[in-house]
Image (cartoon, rainbow, N blue to C red):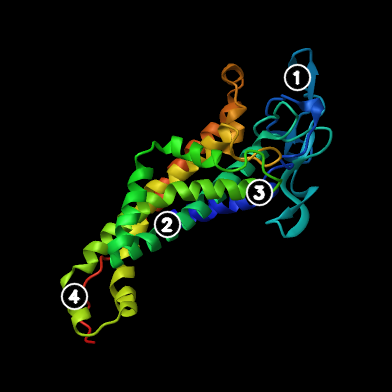
């Protein structure tokens, strides 16, 4: 069940342009601030069909033109895009005939489809967080295992640096790291800067845990016995240290994934992450107005999307089966 949910969620994010009627960058100023235009089932002479009614602005309000139904076509051609960034196509899941516009969450202040922007922003936040999580866990495990296994200066140096960084509050550490980088980078460099900040803040707890685990395994009886029988460092690392670190890596992934998603959204919310035309959940949440959301609850979609991603990520990661801890396998050397 978890695997199916993960696959479906990834397919939704990767196929955002296919699921949404239009791309998140397409502007239609005539429909700026328009409410959702949902499909409705109507009975006609040919049988039941899904239709969408066009919107028209009357002063400061919107009205559906119920006398002009526009049919909804499924798997039909529309705006062209690149699926997965590779294949150019114009196929969309559902699209309404002109002059109506199918809109699941309405339009923002610039006439852009809010549903498409929420999915694309969620995709950006999830991809950045997963890449940062992978790099942080891998680098933290390698640095911590090396320092804990070797001991001496490497062990003391890592302990000193980690303690100094862990003494700082998490958000303050992220802001300090981001302030050390260019605030107005060249186009296309912002995702790399965000990744660098997230990785620099996330490797520390992983490295400390791996360091303690390596220290403990170094003094285990089966490791000492293997070393006394002539086992080399490479054999010990491959047979004992690395298998003992895999449970640690999975255990660290559970709290780190939602923390990185929140960290990325916080940077974007403060204007230190991705900026237009690139979007993430943080940039979308920064545009949410509480006064407007009370009258137009669909504007809360980015906040609800962030909550859903956090809950889904925690549920998927926490359900992973933990491997058995390292122990003596009974092999002779």
Q: Where is residue 193 in the image (x, y as percent from the top left)?
A: 59, 47
Query: Is 100 or 118 nearer to us in this picture?
Result: 118
Mark found first going from the N terminus, 4 or 3: 3
Residue behind mark 4: 224
Q: Where is residue 299 in the image (x, y as percent from the top left)?
A: 61, 27
Mark found first going from the N terminus, 1 or 3: 1
The residue at the far top in this view is: 59
**Residue 102 visible in the current orientation:** yes
Residue behind mark 1: 63
Residue behind mark 3: 189
Helix, strand or loop at disc 4? helix
Give the foreground label among 4 and 1. Answer: 4
Q: 10 Å neighbourhood of mark 2: few (<14), some, or many (≥20)?
A: many
Point out which mark residue 137 bears.
Answer: 2
State how far apart marks 4 and 3 are (Cα): 48 Å
Q: Position of residue 139 (x, y in %)?
A: 44, 59
| Residue 67 versus residue 183 in the image, above or below | above
Give the foreground label among 2 and 4. Answer: 4
Snapshot quadrant of residue 275: top right
How many numbered discs sit on the rendered protein?
A: 4
State the residue at coordinates (49%, 38%).
176
State how far apart marks 1 and 2 are (Cα): 53 Å
State how far apart marks 1 and 3 are (Cα): 43 Å
Is disc 2 in contact with disc 3, using a CB cutoff of under 8 Å? no
């Amino acid at each position: 069940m978890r695997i199916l949910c993960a696959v479906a969620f990834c397919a939704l994010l990767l196929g955002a342009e296919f699921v949404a009627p239009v791309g998140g960058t397409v502007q239609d100023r005539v429909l700026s601030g328009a409410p959702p235009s949902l499909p409705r089932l109507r009975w006609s002479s040919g049988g039941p069909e899904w239709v969408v009614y066009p919107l028209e602005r009357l002063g400061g309000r919107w009205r559906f033109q119920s006398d002009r139904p526009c049919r909804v076509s499924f798997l039909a051609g529309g705006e062209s895009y690149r699926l997965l960034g590779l294949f150019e196509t114009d196929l969309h899941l559902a699209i309404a005939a002109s002059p109506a516009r199918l809109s699941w969450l309405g339009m923002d202040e610039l006439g852009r489809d809010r549903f498409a922007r929420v999915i694309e922003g969620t995709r950006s936040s999830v991809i950045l967080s997963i890449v940062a999580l992978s790099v942080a866990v891998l680098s933290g495990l390698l640095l911590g295992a090396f320092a804990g296994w070797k001991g001496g200066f490497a062990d003391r140096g890592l302990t000193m640096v980690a303690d100094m960084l862990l003494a700082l509050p998490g958000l303050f550490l992220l802001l300090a790291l981001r302030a050390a980088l260019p605030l107005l980078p060249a186009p296309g460099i912002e995702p790399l800067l965000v990744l660098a900040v997230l990785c620099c803040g996330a490797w520390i707890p992983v490295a400390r845990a791996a360091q303690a685990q390596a220290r403990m395994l170094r003094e285990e009886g089966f490791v000492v016995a293997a070393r006394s029988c002539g086992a080399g460092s490479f054999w010990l690392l491959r047979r004992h240290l690395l298998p003992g670190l895999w449970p640690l890596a999975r255990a660290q992934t559970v709290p780190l994934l939602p923390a990185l998603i929140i960290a990325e959204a916080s940077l974007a919310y403060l204007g230190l992450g991705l900026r237009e035309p690139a979007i993430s959940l943080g940039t979308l949440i920064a545009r949410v107005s509480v006064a407007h959301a009370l009258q137009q609850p669909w504007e809360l979609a980015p906040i609800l999307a962030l909550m859903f991603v956090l809950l889904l990520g925690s549920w998927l990661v926490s359900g992973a089966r933990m491997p058995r801890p390292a122990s003596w396998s009974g092999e002779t050397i």
